[in-house]
Image: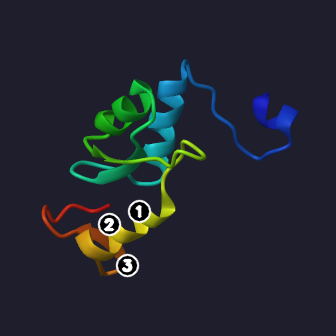
């Protein structure tokens, strides 16, 4: 019904925003021991959905102008704290997939 009403081929209904976030993370393959980038200015449901997947949030500061992730800081951390392996981003210190 929802798919027909919105003109898409598939849709899913969930009981809460947290359930929706969890379903989205599972759908893109987030799993045990992964690190998931998250802005430090957030709410608990984001971190909980990541934890439900067995992953951990990797918190980054936000900009004062937009209160969203700071692209320069994120780039700096990715360049210094991660490396590419087989098409995946790996955290140097822990060996976890980002």
Question: Which class describes the residues within 10 Å of circle 1: few (<14), some (14-19), or many (20+)?
Answer: some
Residue at 49% x, 51% y is 69
Considering every residue shown, the one lying at the far left of the view is: 93
Say which label, 3 or 1, has the lower sequence index. Answer: 1
Q: How far apart are marks 2 and 1 (CA)?
A: 5 Å
Regarding mark 3 in the picture, which secondary structure is present there?
loop
Residue at 44% x, 27% y is 43
Dividing the picture into quarters, in which one does residue 56 lie? top left
Q: Mark 3 points at which residue?
A: 87
Q: Which quarter of the image is occupied by the C terminus?
A: bottom left
Considering every residue shown, the one lying at the far front of the view is: 64
Q: How far apart are marks 3 and 2 (CA)?
A: 18 Å
Say which label, 3 or 2, has the lower sequence index. Answer: 2
Considering every residue shown, the one lying at the far top of the view is: 15
* Rendered view: 31 above or below 95: above
Q: Mark 2 points at which residue?
A: 77
Regarding mark 1 in the picture, which secondary structure is present there?
helix
Q: Mark 1 points at which residue?
A: 74
Q: Which of these two is toward me, 4 or 73?
A: 73
Question: Which class describes the residues within 10 Å of circle 3: few (<14), some (14-19), or many (20+)?
Answer: few
Q: Which of these two is toward me, 95 or 41?
A: 41
Question: Which class describes the residues within 10 Å of circle 2: few (<14), some (14-19), or many (20+)?
Answer: few
Q: Which quarter of the image is occupied by the N terminus?
A: top right
Residue at 50% x, 35% y is 21
Is mark 2 in CB contact (under 8 Å) with mark 1? yes
């Amino acid at each position: 019904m929802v798919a027909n009403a919105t003109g898409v081929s598939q849709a899913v209904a969930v009981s809460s925003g947290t359930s929706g976030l969890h379903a989205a993370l599972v759908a893109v393959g987030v799993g045990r021991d992964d690190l998931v980038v998250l802005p430090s200015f957030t709410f608990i449901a984001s971190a909980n959905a990541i934890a439900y997947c067995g992953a951990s949030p990797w918190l980054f500061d936000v900009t004062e102008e937009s209160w969203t992730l700071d692209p320069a800081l994120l780039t700096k951390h990715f360049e210094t704290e991660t490396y590419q392996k087989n098409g995946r981003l790996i955290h140097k210190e822990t060996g976890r997939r980002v």
